[in-house]
Image (cartoon, rainbow, N blue to C red):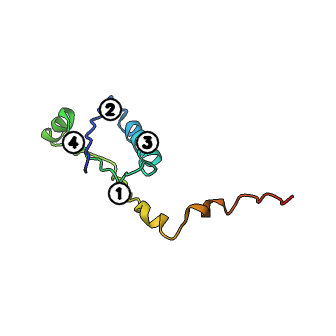
Amino acid sequence: MAIKVIVEFQAKPGERSKLKSLLREISSTHGPNAPGFLGSTVYETLDSSDLETLVSGALLTREKPPPKVQTPPKQEEKKGRRILDALDGLPTPEKA
């Protein structure tokens, strides 16, 4: 079953890079660790000020987007491990 969530954020004037870095941080911190998370995609759209800039003949300058991060499937990590493997690092009780 697929669930698609679309969220729209609008940055205040001059705060675009701050918003982008915050979203990047949230995505990298919480996304890959969430069960069932397969990845995310960020799209940018033009707003009215961008259109006015283009119509006036000026160029838009934007940062290059970071490369897409793909998290490996969780099944690969679990392959070959057993439930009791987690106990390997624990101290063993002494026999009385």
State which tag comes first along the sequence, 4 or 3.
3
Residue to which mark 4 is pinned: 45
Quadrant of residue 11 within the rendered picture: top left
Please name the residue shown 25% across and 40% down the image: 6
Residue to which mark 2 is pinned: 11
Residue 68: mark in rendering: 1
Residue in the foreground of this view, choosing between 81 and 65: 81
| Circle 3: residue type | Ile
Q: Position of residue 79 (x, y in %)?
A: 47, 68
Residue in the foreground of this view, choosing between 93 and 41: 93
Please name the residue shown 84% across and 60% down the image: 95
Measured in 3D between alpha carbons, the distance from the residue under mark 4 to the one under mark 3, in whole angstroms, is 21 Å
In terms of secondary structure, where does tag 1 sit? loop
Q: Residue furthest top?
A: 12
Instruction: In the rendered view, tell whether residue 26 sits above or below residue 80.
Output: above
| Circle 1: residue type | Lys
Measured in 3D between alpha carbons, the distance from the residue under mark 1 to the one under mark 2, in whole angstroms, is 22 Å
Residue 26: mark in rendering: 3
Q: Is residue 65 left or right of residue 45?
A: right
State which tag comes first along the sequence, 2 or 3.
2
The answer to the question of whether label 4 and label 1 lie on touching residues, with beta carbons closer than 8 A, is no
State which tag comes first along the sequence, 4 or 1.
4
Measured in 3D between alpha carbons, the distance from the residue under mark 2 to the one under mark 3, in whole angstroms, is 16 Å
Measured in 3D between alpha carbons, the distance from the residue under mark 4 to the one under mark 2, in whole angstroms, is 12 Å
Instruction: In the rendered view, tell whether residue 49 sits above or below residue 35.
Output: above
